Amino acid sequence: MDEETKKTGVLDSIADKIAEYEKAGLWDKEVEDNPETKVLMPDKVDYLGKKLSSKIGTFFANRAAIRFYENEIKKGNFVIKAINGIENYTEVESGAIITCNHFSVYDNYAIYRAIREYLPKGHYLYKVIREGNYTNFGGLYGYFFRHCNTLPLSSHPKTMMNFMHAVDTLLTRGEKILVYPEQAMWRNYRKPRPMKNGAFRLAVKSKVPIIPAFITMEDTERLDAGGNKIQAFTVWFLPPIYLKKELSDKENTEYLKTKNYEVWKSLYEKVYDIPLKYGE
């Protein structure tokens, strides 16, 4: 079996899993074979980049990542068609959680590229990632996962305490943090999925708004290595969602999550001109 046939088979298998998990409501279940998760210990991550080695690593990794993704754009392997609603992003001058649908290894760079000229000097887009992506992912993407302003989750309680402290520190100083509230990446899946509470709990804890972002896709005529049509991205920033003073923390978490889903759903139905339905 040649390599292209193998890749096509893999993508077909992923599509079958997505259809199966959608029908079963397993919204946060991984559909691809990720490396086994290794526990992230507290001394193995410098969330706030205080060490000189962390600063040097981040500097060079970010430069390498920008070169890589921009080269992918030049080659036509990664297409950003448009950015809409940037005024909704710039409205928020404080720290904020940016939520986005997760369907591609390119989607975080699409968000970064959309906002980079609006980031104050010395500020970055931070990204919350899964534990295994940080501890056990190899190759170029593994390098990016470990060094490009990432905030890995952890199954170790002490590491998670450090994570929570770092997130609060970053948001308090005005940074933007990208979180995928759907959790798992479903490749090229266009629908919004029901969300987990984590992103919204972080916003409530640090008393910052949510900036909902949603990326829609359309087929291009260009094919990827597996014979699938490359997708052109349109990045949408929707009106920020602010906490309500009269609600408890638990109520605000639910409010932010529900409202975020509603605006994603509304945009999906408007752009694709179809009602949102699952399991069909």
Image: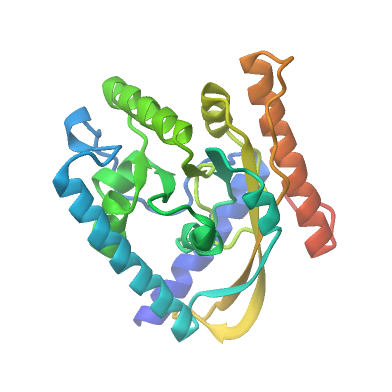
Number of callouts in the render? 0
Residue at point 71%, 40% (across, down): 261
Compared across the picture, whether 33 is left or right of 36 comes to right
> Would you say residue 278 is visible in this rendering?
no
Residue at point 65%, 54% (across, down): 214
> Percent position (x, y) of residue 160?
34, 26
Front residue of 202 and 137:
202
Compared across the picture, whether 147 is left or right of 121 comes to left
Compared across the picture, whether 250 is left or right of 165 comes to right
- Say which quarter of the image contains residue 252: top right
Residue at point 41%, 35% (across, down): 170
> Percent position (x, y) of residue 169?
40, 30
> Percent position (x, y) of residue 159?
28, 27
Quarter containing the N terminus: bottom left
| Residue 276 vertical placement versus 200 (above, below) | below
Front residue of 78 and 6:
78
Name the image colouring: rainbow
Compared across the picture, whether 256 is left or right of 266 comes to left
Residue at point 77%, 54% (across, down): 267
Furthest toward the left, the residue is 53
> Percent position (x, y) of residue 189?
61, 58
> Would you say residue 62 is visible in this rendering?
yes
Furthest toward the front, the residue is 121
Front residue of 143 and 120:
120
